[in-house]
Amino acid sequence: MGTKLRKTYRFALFTSLYITFILAILIFIFELIFFNVNWSSILFFGIACFLVSFFLIQIRVEIFIYRRVKSIYDSVSLLDSASLSKSKITTDITSLKLEVEKFAKDKKLEIETLQVRENYRKEFMGNISHELKTPLFTVQGYILTLLDGAIKDKKVRKKYLNRASKGVDRLLYIVKDLDMITKLETGDLNLHQDDFDLIEMIENVFELLEMKAAKKEISVKLDKNYQRPVLVHGDQERVQQVLTNLIVNSIKYGRKKGNTTISIEDINKDHLVIKVIDDGIGIEKEHIPRLFERFFRVDKSGSRKEGGSGLGLSIVKHIIEAHEENLAVESEFGKGSTFSFTLKKANQYKKLSIKN
C-alpha cells in the first residue's frame, strides 16, 4: 500500500463526511425554521458527528472484513496452512487477493508436478516390472523344465542351467545398476577423485569392448594419435564406466561396418570435453529430452534383443552430475549421434598445456 491511505480508512473517512454533511444541513434547516442559527453549535455537532461516525464505521468495517477474511484464511488453511503467509491476517482486500492468487498458482504448480511424478512413477513401475519379468520368467521356465524330468538328460541339464545362469546374471546386473543410481542420487556413493591419464583409460576401454565391436564390424578409435598423456581429475573407475556405457551404446545402435570415434578437445584452461561420436541410426528429436531416464529405450524391441539393463545412460548422467560436470547429446536421425561430457584438467596437465 505504501504511503496510500488504507482503503478501510478512506471508506470510513468519506462515509463519515457524507453523514456529517447531511446531518449538519438538516440541523441548519431545523434551527433556521424553529430557532436562531447557532453556527458554533452546528460546528461542534459536525466535528463530534464526524469523529463518532468515523470510528464506529472504521471499527465495524474492520470487524466485518476481518471475520470474512479470517473465514477465507481458515478455509484455505485446511488445504495447506504452510503455503499461506505466517504474518498477521490482513484486512486489505488487495493484499488478500494477491496472497490467494499466489496460493492458487503454487497449488496449481504443485498439482502439475505431482501429476508428472505420478505418470513417471507409473511408467517406471511398468518398465522395471517388464525388465525384471523377462529374465525371471526365463529362469523359471528352465528350472520348471528341469524339474519336470529334463534334469536326467545331461546335455539338456547343462544347457538349461547355463541359460538360467545368464538370466540370473541379467537380474543381478539390473539390481546392481539400480543400486548405483540410488546411491548416486542420495549422495551415498563417494567419488575417489585423483589425477589419471585419460588416453590410457580410453585404450583400456577399447580393449574391453574389442570383441563386442568386432561382432558388428564397428571401428572404435581415437580421433588422432596423442603423443603425450592427457591428465584429468576425477574418479577414474566412474569415468571409465561413463565411457564404457557410451561406447557400448554407440555399438548397440551403430550400423554394421560403422565407426565410433572418441575426441578430446580443450574448452578452457581448466576443462576438457570428451566426445563419443558415431554414425549409427541416430535419435529422433522428440526422444532426446527423455534419453537419460531410467529404462527409457528409443527402440524398445531392438534394444531388448541387444540386452543390457536399460540404465546405462541414466548412470552416465548421475556420474557426470556427481562430478559437477556437464553432459550433452546431439543427434540427427539416420546420421548418428554425439555424446559429450566435460572433465577437469589435472593441475599438472594445465601447466603442460600452457608450456606447449
Image (tube, helix red, strand yellow):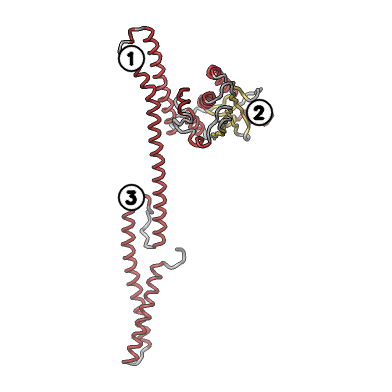
Which residue has dot 1 on it?
145
Q: Residues within 10 Å of mark 2 (few under 14, many from 20)?
A: few
Q: Where is residue 106 in the image (x, y as percent from the top left)?
A: 41, 49
Q: Which residue is drawn at 41% across and 45% down?
A: 112
Q: Earlier in the sequence, mark 3 or mark 1?
A: 3
Disc 3 element: helix
Which residue has dot 3 on it?
79
The N terminus is located in which quarter? Answer: bottom left
Q: Which residue is drawn at 62% across and 34% down?
A: 267
In the picture, residue 281 is in which quadrant? top right
Q: Which of marks 2 and 1 is nearer the N terminus?
A: 1
Q: Which residue is drawn at 55% across and 30% down?
A: 282
The Cα–Cα distance between marks 2 and 1, rounded to whole angstroms, is 64 Å
| Pair 2/3: label in front | 3
Q: Residues within 10 Å of mark 1 (few under 14, many from 20)?
A: some
The Cα–Cα distance between marks 2 and 3, rounded to whole angstroms, is 62 Å
**Identity of the amino acid at label 1?**
Thr
Q: Where is residue 308 in the image (x, y as percent from the top left)?
A: 46, 24
Which residue has dot 2 on it?
352
